[in-house]
Image: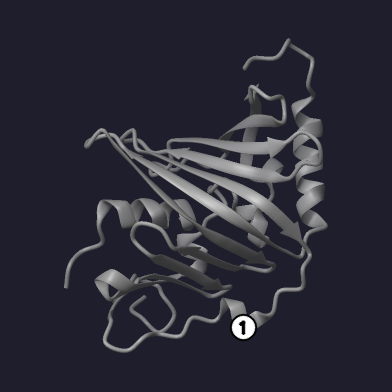
Amino acid sequence: MRPLSRRALGAFAAAVAFVVAVPAGAVDVDDVVRRVQERYDATEDFVADVTQEMKVASLDKSMTSRGTVAFKKPGRMRWEFTEEERQIIVADGETLWFYRPEEQQVFKAAFDRAFRSTTPISFLTGVGEIGDDFVVSLDGESDDGELYYLKMVPKRADPDVGQLRLFVAQENGDIRGAEVRDPLGNVSTLRFRDVRRNVGLGEDQFVFEIPEDVDIITAPGAPGGEP
């Protein structure tokens, strides 16, 4: 049984692992955070197309994957990357599953351990709130003026978390992406397109059926695994 690859771990950390300079005082960061939180407090579910770029510092190499993502409160999510190496990530609120068909490998973990509130998009699944879990500051805006970049510093120290940024639509507070830079200098960037809110997702989308003839790697504390 082969161990999880660097790229797979990067994708998992990004999954469960998840706003140009402006004049001082021109934007109230607390107001931006409030609008973002209110936007997602009023969002029961959403779907979007997603692009992930992973830059591996030690290899000086970038890898890009594209696919779809679906979130539903509380604690449900499904990521499917269909380009390059296929990957499926599913959470049902209790268990997080990470499946790589080409490797015939499934990674199983407890949702609350793998997807902590210190990940930048955790609140999309109803885990925590931005203002409660992060110290937030403006980190500029996009060249086209459509996005704010928010720098997120976890209030609770986490040695596995480096620098976090959230990409927020100025128009309506939608999350358009996130960036995670780990302590080793690796950077994972997620970008969302065609975001559709409150579409009435069914529970069946967040049920993972274990394929036949796969190796299952169970993390400590996972439901049905070792404590």
Q: Residue at x 63, y 30 (%)?
A: 149
Left or right side of 192 for 98: left
> How many neighbours does mark 1 have within 10 angstroms: few (below 14), some (14-19), or many (20 or more)?
few
Left or right side of 199 for 17: left
Q: Residue at x 81, y 36 (%)?
A: 171
Helix, strand or loop at label 1? It is helix
Left or right side of 216 for 188: right
Residue 58 in sight here:
yes
Q: Position of residue 94 (x, y in %)?
A: 54, 75
Left or right side of 20 for 131: right
145 or 119, which is in the foreground?
145
Q: Residue at x 62, y 64 (%)?
A: 70
- Image quadrant containing the N terminus: bottom left
User: Number of marks in the image?
Assistant: 1
Q: Position of residue 138 (x, y in %)?
A: 66, 25
Disc 1: which residue: 204
Q: Position of residue 111 (x, y in %)?
A: 50, 68
Q: Quadrant of residue 187?
A: top left
Give the answer, above or below, for where 52 lies relative to 115.
Answer: above
Give the answer, above or below, for where 216 lies relative to 158.
Answer: below
126 or 165, which is in the foreground?
165
- Image quadrant containing the C terminus: bottom left
Question: Looking at numbered disc 1 in the image, what kind of residue is underneath it?
Answer: Asp
Q: Position of residue 216 (x, y in %)?
A: 30, 79
Q: Residue at x 37, y 85 (%)?
A: 211
Q: Residue furthest top?
A: 23
149 or 61, which is in the foreground?
61
